[in-house]
Image (cartoon, helix red, strand yellow):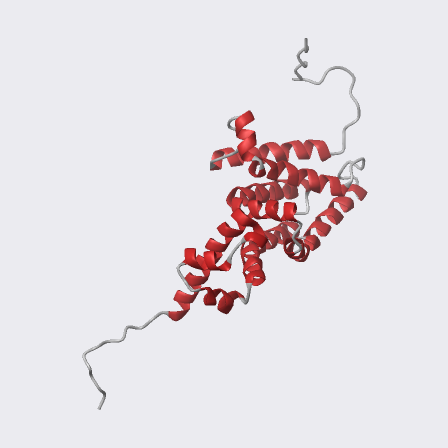
Amino acid sequence: MPRHDGATRPSIPRHRDAAATQIRLLDAAEREFAQRGYAGARLKDIASVAGVQTTLIHHYFADKRGLYRAVMDRALAPQQTESWNLLRVHRDLEGLVRGFVAMLIRFYAKHKHLLAIMRHEAVTGSEVLPEILRERMTPLADAVVAMIADMQSRGELRTDVRPLDVVVLTLSMAVHPFVDGLLLEAVLPGSVPSDDEALARREDTIATLLLRALSVPPAAVAGPIPGAVSAPQIP
């Protein structure tokens, strides 16, 4: 006969609890690493914010390095997958440019803590972040550079710019407003996109400029360009 002591033991969704705990830890760690960098972050503080014991960090992520890697991978893995998909799907210049610009703008707008972490590591010279970026992003960057060079060899792109410079300039235009947003807003109010409409407008502007700059220039035509506006005279 089963024993009935009047107490019921509810079923505990262990896997759901574990996943929720890991998310809280990753969220807390992302904020901590953004504020203090890898070297300054404390596991005790991260655990406290997440509402758990420090032992759970070691249980799920092994150590501080493992937690840091998990934070970075959570953001970088989807971007890596989307980037490879763009390279597989789009073989034309416009599709690639607009696809990558949109992906970069949305990524940086969403992951401002990640940008803060990167800035910390760039200043302190940590070896952890470069290791992760080399693993996650270098093969992708090499593939993009190789594709640009291939387009140049087929006469689809102008050849007087280095493929590496194209990648660097594209990244710079996409990331700068989010990295130095506070300074930009002080000097140029409204320069940092803050809603979907502004993000879409920035995506289109950058992509259009890149496409015009990278396209093989047409034969020179004498006379003024239709619709061109003369530059104002500077006193």
Q: Look at 50% across and 33% down and name the residue there.
A: 198
| Vertical arrangement, residue 196 with respect to residue 143, above or below | above
Spot the residue most to the bottom: 1
Residue 90 at x, y = what percent? 65, 47
Q: Look at 75% across and 39% down and name the residue there.
A: 156
Q: Based on the displayed image, in which of its 4 quarters is residue 49 positioned?
A: bottom left
Residue 63 at x, y = what percent? 55, 65
What is the number of callouts on the image?
0
- Choose between 216 and 73: the one closer to the eye: 73
Residue 117 at x, y = what percent? 57, 48
Residue 205 at x, y = what percent? 60, 31
For the C terminus, give its image quadrant: top right
| Vertical arrangement, residue 195 with respect to residue 143, above or below | above
Q: Look at 54% across and 51% down and name the residue there.
A: 33
| Vertical arrangement, residue 21 with respect to residue 202, above or below | below
Q: Is residue 45 left or right of residue 222?
A: left
- Choose between 231 and 123: the one closer to the eye: 123
| Vertical arrangement, residue 44 with respect to residue 212, above or below | below
- Choose between 22 and 94: the one closer to the eye: 22
For the N terminus, give its image quadrant: bottom left
Spot the residue most to the left: 6
- Choose between 122 and 198: the one closer to the eye: 122
Question: Can residue 94 be seen at all in this image of the molecule?
Answer: no
Question: Can residue 24 be seen at all in this image of the molecule?
Answer: yes
